Image: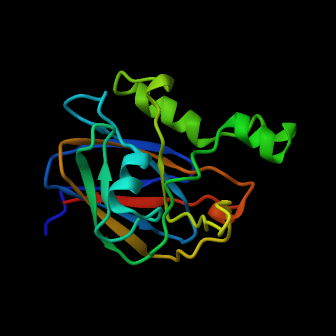
Amino acid sequence: MATDYDFTIPARAPWSHVLKKGQTLRIVDLEGNQAVDCILYSAADPAERYSSCETVVAQKNIFLNVGTVLMSNEGNPMMTIVADNCGRHDTSGGACSCESNTLRYGHHTKHQHACVENFIYELGQHGLGKRDMVSNINWFMNVPVEADGALGIVDGISAPGKFLELRAEMDTLVVISNCPQINNPCNGFNPTPVRVTIS
């Protein structure tokens, strides 16, 4: 299939693009062990947006795999995972912020750039703001869930060249923060670029 769009998102940077229904987005972890935070909106009506709760309930699984349909807050399919050679992604751990960095890692980290700031910047390009932020997906991020329900953030299982593909089930605004987190193992403490292609 011919590629219509090809871009490398620098380490720590935001990105967004509208996919038409039927188009496929491939995200490639170029150097391995890089978390990619992602939120979705209906391009026709941004009030309709990704819901981790609807997605987990619809598939009866907390983990995202090939065949998972990413659902909106109105219960409609937004995108489907059609290929994945990593096998571990998270939609429970949320996005890092200056505030969460301070709480988790100490006040000296408050100045550090975080995914929430990336999302706010990129949403502003589409007339959206902080109050439009919703639960997110952490592609390639390894968040095991213990028997007691506790979440962990541990070393990733992704590697250079690992990728996933998402088919748009509606015209969808995809907003990405190529996670700048350096305080936990989600990026191997060293954020790196990722490649996005659309076909």
Q: Quadrant of the N terminus?
A: bottom left
Q: 44 and 60: which one is in front?
A: 60
For the image, the number of numbered tags is: 0
Point 43% across, 48% down: residue? 52
Residue occupying image coordinates x 39% and y 78%: 85
When asked about the image quadrant of residue 69, the answer is bottom left
- Choose top left, top right, bottom left or bottom right for residue 75: top left
Q: Is residue 92 above or below residue 98?
A: below
Q: How far across and down, in percent of the image, does residue 164 sit? A: 36, 68
| Residue 15 figure quarter | top left
Quarter of the C terminus within the rendering: bottom left
Task: Depth check: give the residue in front, 116 or 152.
Answer: 152
Vertical arrangement, residue 126 with respect to residue 72, above or below: above
Left or right placement of residue 5 versus residue 119 in this view: left
Image-based side of 46 in relation to 90, left or right: left
Q: Position of residue 51 (x, y in %)?
A: 39, 43
The image position of residue 162, as x and y in percent, is 43, 75
Is 146 on the left-hand or right-hand side of 69? right
Q: Residue at x 14, y 66 (%)?
A: 2
- Colour scheme: rainbow
Looking at the image, residue 2 sits to the left or right of residue 19; the answer is left
Q: Indicate whether 65 appears above or below 137.
A: below
Q: Residue at x 53, y 74 (%)?
A: 158
On the image, the x and y values in percent for residue 32 come to 54, 72
